[in-house]
Image (cartoon, rainbow, N blue to C red):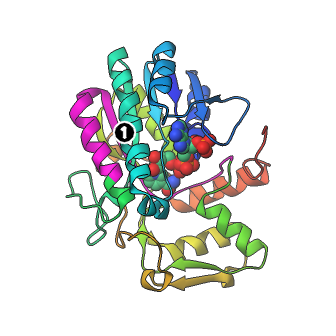
Amino acid sequence: MRAIVVGGSGQIGGWLLRILAERGHEAVGTYQSVPYLDLVLVDASRLEESAAWLRELRPDVVFYPAGFTWVDGCERDPTRALSANLEQPLNLARVAADLGARFVYFSTDYVFDGLAGPYDELSATNAVSVYGRSKLDAEHALTRELGDSAIVVRTSWVFGPERQGKNFAYQLVKALGQGRTLDCPSDQLSSPSYGPDVARAVVLLVEAGYSGLIHVAGPGVIDRVEFARSLAVAFSLEPDGIVGRTTAELGQGAPRPLHGGLLTPRLDAILPGVMRPLDHSLADFVARIAGGEGWAIPEK
Ligand SMILES: NC(=O)c1ccc[n+]([C@@H]2O[C@H](COP(=O)([O-])OP(=O)(O)OC[C@H]3O[C@@H](n4cnc5c(N)ncnc54)[C@H](OP(=O)(O)O)[C@@H]3O)[C@@H](O)[C@H]2O)c1
C-alpha cells in the first residue's frame, strides 16, 4: 500500500515508517519542527496547503500520529489543542475520504476520567483534561464523518527507542545516569506500551482491513513509580533517584486520569500476543540502545 505518516518525526510515527518499510509498503513521512532528511515538511495547521499536498500524493492510507501531545500545554492553550488535535486531522481526514483512502488517528486513555480503569472499547468516556477532550472530540468527529474508513487507535504511556529521545524512558535514564532525581506520580496508573509493538500492531490492523475504534496498548497496568523502577533495573541504573509523589503534590498543569490504562480485547482477538509483556519490551529496548539505536538525533 501507499502510506503517508503525518508526524513521521515523532515517536510512533518514526516506528510506523520503519515497520511500513520492513513490510514492503511505500511510505512518505512528514515533520513539522524537527527536520530529518528522509522526511517532508508538512504543517497541518496550514489547512489548504497540507490538504493540497495530500491530494497530490493520492495515498491508500494516512496515519496521523501527530498533534499537540503536551498534556499540560493543551490545558494552557485550549484553542491550539482543539486546532491541532481535532481541526487539523479532520481537515486531512476529509481529503483522505475524498481520495478513498483510510485514515488512522491516534487517541489516548486520557479520554477516560481514571476513576475505574483499565478501560475497554465499550467503557464510557469522560475526559478530565483539555488534551483528553480534544482527542475525544476528534474520535467522535472522525467516526461520524468517515465511518468505515476511519481507524481510531487508543494507546497509552508509549516508550521505547525514538529519534527525538523525548519519552519518559529517556528522561528517566538521563536523570538517573546523571545522578539527578526524578519525581514520578505514584498514584497514576496506566498501560506502558512499547512503541515498536504499537506501530507493528497498527500496520497489521490496517493490512487486515480493520476499521473503527481499537485499543493498542501493552498488557498490564502499573503505576508510574513501578514503571520507572522497571526501566531503571532494565538499564542497570540505581533506582534511588526515583521519587514517588502524589499527583496532588506534583501540581501538574492538567488533571490526569489516575486509574487509567487500556484493556485490549479487540486487539487480542485479532492479533494475540502482538504487544509483548513489559519485561520483553524492556529487553528489546535495552538491546536496541546497546546496538547504538535511538539515543542520538541523527541526520539533522
Ligand atoms: N506518547 C504517548 O504516550 C501517547 C499516549 C497516548 C496517545 N498518544 C498519541 O499518539 C500520537 C503520537 O504520539 P507520539 O508520542 O508519537 O507524539 P510525538 O512524539 O510528540 O510526535 C508528534 C508528531 O506530530 C508532529 N506535529 C506536531 N505539530 C504538527 C503540525 N502542525 N503539522 C504536522 N505535524 C505536526 C510532530 O512533528 P515535529 O516533532 O517535527 O514538530 C511529531 O512528528 C499523538 O497523537 C498522541 O496524542 C501518544
The image shows residue 292 at horizontal and vertical percentages of 80, 49
The image shows residue 146 at horizontal and vertical percentages of 26, 29
Look at the image and say whether residue 153 sits in the magenta stretch.
yes
The image shows residue 106 at horizontal and vertical percentages of 41, 44
Q: Residue at x 78, y 54 (%)?
A: 290
| Secondary element type, mark 1 | helix
Look at the image and say whether residue 24 sits in the magenta stretch.
no
* Residue placed most toward the observer, 279 or 141: 141
Q: Which residue is disc 1 drawn over?
A: 87
* Residue placed most toward the observer, 267 or 77: 77
Give the image quarter of residue 84: top left
Give the image quarter of residue 204: top left
Q: Is residue 184 left or right of residue 33?
A: left
Does any portion of residue 196 appear in the rendered image? no
Does any portion of residue 102 appear in the rendered image? yes
178 shown above or below 13? below
169 shown above or below 97? below
Q: Is residue 202 left or right of residue 37?
A: left
Quadrant position of the C terminus in the picture? top right
Residues drawn in magenta: 134-163
Amino acid marked by disc 1: Glu
The image shows residue 271 at horizontal and vertical percentages of 39, 40
Q: Is residue 252 left or right of residue 286?
A: left
Q: Residues within 10 Å of mark 1 (few under 14, many from 20)?
A: many
Q: Is residue 138 left or right of residue 201?
A: left
